[in-house]
Image (tube, rainbow, N blue to C red):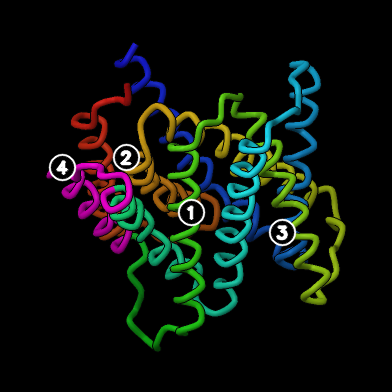
Amino acid sequence: MTRSKKLVGTLCAIGAAVAYGTNPFGALNLYAEGMNTPSVLFYRFGLAWVIVAVVMLFRKESLRVDRRQFLTLTALGLLFIASSLTLYLSFHLMPAGVASTILFTYPVMTAVIMSLFFHERTTMSTVIAIVLSLIGVLLLYWGDGNGTLHIGGVVLVLVSALTYAMYIIVVDKSPLPMSSFKINFYVLFYCAFGMALFALVSGQPLMLPPSPRAWFFVGWLAVVPAIMALVMMVYAAKYLGSTPTAILGALEPTTAVIIGIFVFDEPFTFRLLVGILLILCAVTIVVAFKPAKK
């Protein structure tokens, strides 16, 4: 059972990272259609919530939760709102590739929090995997070195990384005896409501997707990097643990780079090849040396 849990957790962590990595495929095309950030995020989370609600209706799954579960689900919703919103806001202050590089500090944050507050022993294999994955991500997004980073953008991305790390840890450590669909029913509801509220407060009105093509990309964002990624993330954190799940998240920027190459005709260089190989080495170390949770 332990070995099968490790396999399921590993496959779910890889699947979640790859699904998250397809965000640029939907977001960049919706921006090209003229949609603003609150609208993209609102329709991403709103449509995902409707789909999950329909799934739960067919599963005849109760929505009832007790007070402790409600508070935990509320915390998860607020953390994911904070992580998503701060990351998307940072895109206005720095290139998305640079933001993605800084965002990948979250495995380090996860490992530190787990060590300080949950007394998780940091093994040498974990340290090596984190170092390899960080170097790999830096190689994927290494820029020309021109200009300076916007301090506000850096702060936003670091907040995004910290809240994402905390989201993974809360999923891992919280006693939520319910399905992944039920958890994400509440998380997605909070996210959609939060984006609508942000649109109202920021004075950026919600915009309907302007074309069938835009609706396709909204559907993509709702199904792949929202539903699929969030559902698999729950199983990954529960079966594999917070730190290895975070490290396997290195496949997210790798996926984004591959999409850039094959969809947006970005060049494939030796530097990108080395970065991808380092990340795959980190993934291999996690899979080979991390024991499953009991």
Residue drawn where x is 44% and y is 63% of the image? 100
Q: Quadrant of the N terminus?
A: top left
Q: Nearer the viewer, mark 3 or mark 2?
A: 2
Against 74, is 134 above or below? below
Return the disc, 3 or 4, that comes first in the chain's sequence.
Answer: 3
Q: Which residue is mark 1?
A: 164
Residue type, numbered disc 3: Leu
- As measured in the structure, the alpha-carbon distance from the residue carrying label 3 to the one carrying label 1 is 24 Å
Residue drawn where x is 23% and y is 35% of the image? 284
* Residue 235 within the segment the image draws in magenta: no
Position in image of residue 226 (x %, y %): 63, 43
Label 2 crowd (10 A; few <14 / some 14-19 / many >=20): many
Position in image of residue 281 (x %, y %): 22, 42
13 or 119, nearer to the observer? 119
Residue type, numbered disc 2: Pro
Q: In this picture, which residue range is highlighted in magenta? A: 115-139
The disc placed on residue 244 is 2
Q: Are marks 2 and 4 in contact (CB under 8 Å)?
A: no
Q: Which residue is mark 3?
A: 30
Against 39, is 74 above or below? above
Return the disc, 3 or 1, that comes first in the chain's sequence.
Answer: 3
Residue type, numbered disc 1: Tyr
Q: Which residue is mark 4?
A: 123
Q: Are marks 1 and 2 in contact (CB under 8 Å)?
A: no
Q: Quadrant of the C terminus?
A: top left
Return the disc, 4 or 1, that comes first in the chain's sequence.
Answer: 4
Q: Nearer the viewer, mark 3 or mark 4?
A: 4
Position in image of residue 180 (x %, y %): 59, 29
* Residue 123 within the segment the image draws in magenta: yes
Label 3 crowd (10 A; few <14 / some 14-19 / many >=20): many
